[in-house]
Amino acid sequence: MNEHYLNALRLHDTTLPARAAGISPSFLEDVARNWQSFDSQSRSIALSTAAAMPNPVAGRFLQSVSGLRGEPAAVQAAAALFHHPHAPEGASLLTTAANVPDPAVRTHLYRAAGVRNGPVSQLEQRYKDETDEDAKLAARDSMARLGHVPSLRAIFRQTLEATAGDVMDVQDSLLFVEDKRLAKAMVPWLLSEDAVTRLSSDRSPAMIRQCDYGVWIAYRLKTGVVVPVSHIDNYAHAVIAAAKPVLQRLPDIEE
């Protein structure tokens, strides 16, 4: 049966990921043994299939590909580890990251390690040694997700000082860390009507403002902020005003 799926992979059968639940884990072992014989499209389909296979073999396969030097598909493999239910433990992912030359791959591995309870001490060392700015921030965010107070405070300061041009990056950090205490730093955002992104399409003149993002992120962090619709919008002044005392009452980040 594995040979059937291997042939489908070589023929670029894009339905394989949708059929992943019924494919034996041993299929990925065969893919690994024949990896060099596959072209880039087949490799991408193999990784999408592994990402949809809920077993530890798939998690180890994704980790293995993410650690391949000079492998263009390594970024896809590392990104898939973030959501995979059977990704290897964080310590193992950080060991892989330490030997990966591509900073984009390291960035994904650091974030996956944060989800998989990587040791903070190991993340601290990766943060100290990291030379790429995006990867360094990913290591910091993972430490914050795991409760590292200095990292939480660094994100708090970054959020407090953020301008409209910083909003999207800060949003990524806040939603990844998932610590509602950080939302308290968005109180100044509620005063800013500076435009960040378009509301819907390029044809629409309406813009989503920094204050709107402050309300929306606070809602997604389950702070108690209430929004009238289940998507980001140009919120009414009353909605924004009501969010302020909710954020102000959030607890501080303490040792």
Image (spheres, rainbow, N blue to C red):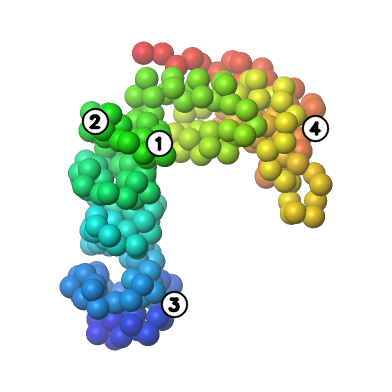
The reply to whether discs 2 and 1 touch (Cβ–Cβ < 8 Å) is no
For badge 2, the amino acid type reads: Gln
For badge 4, the amino acid type reads: Ala
At which x and y percent is residue 3? 24, 85
Sooner in the amino-acid sequence: mark 2 or mark 1: 2
For disc 3, the marked residue is 14
The reply to whether discs 2 and 3 touch (Cβ–Cβ < 8 Å) is no
For disc 1, the marked residue is 133
Where disc 1 sits, the SS reads helix
Q: Give the Cα separation between the discs numbered 1 and 3.
A: 35 Å
At which x and y percent is residue 185? 56, 21
**Is 136 above or below relative to 7?**
above
Sooner in the amino-acid sequence: mark 2 or mark 4: 2
Q: Nearer the viewer, mark 2 or mark 1?
A: 1
Q: Is residue 121 left or right of residue 81?
A: left
Q: Nearer the viewer, mark 1 or mark 3?
A: 1
Image quadrant occupied by the N terminus = bottom left
Density class for disc 3 (Cα within 10 Å; few <14, some 14-19, many ≥20) is some
Where disc 4 sits, the SS reads loop
At 44% from the left edge and 78% from the top edge, which residue is drawn? Answer: 15
For disc 2, the marked residue is 125
Q: Is residue 229 left or right of residue 204?
A: left
For disc 4, the marked residue is 236
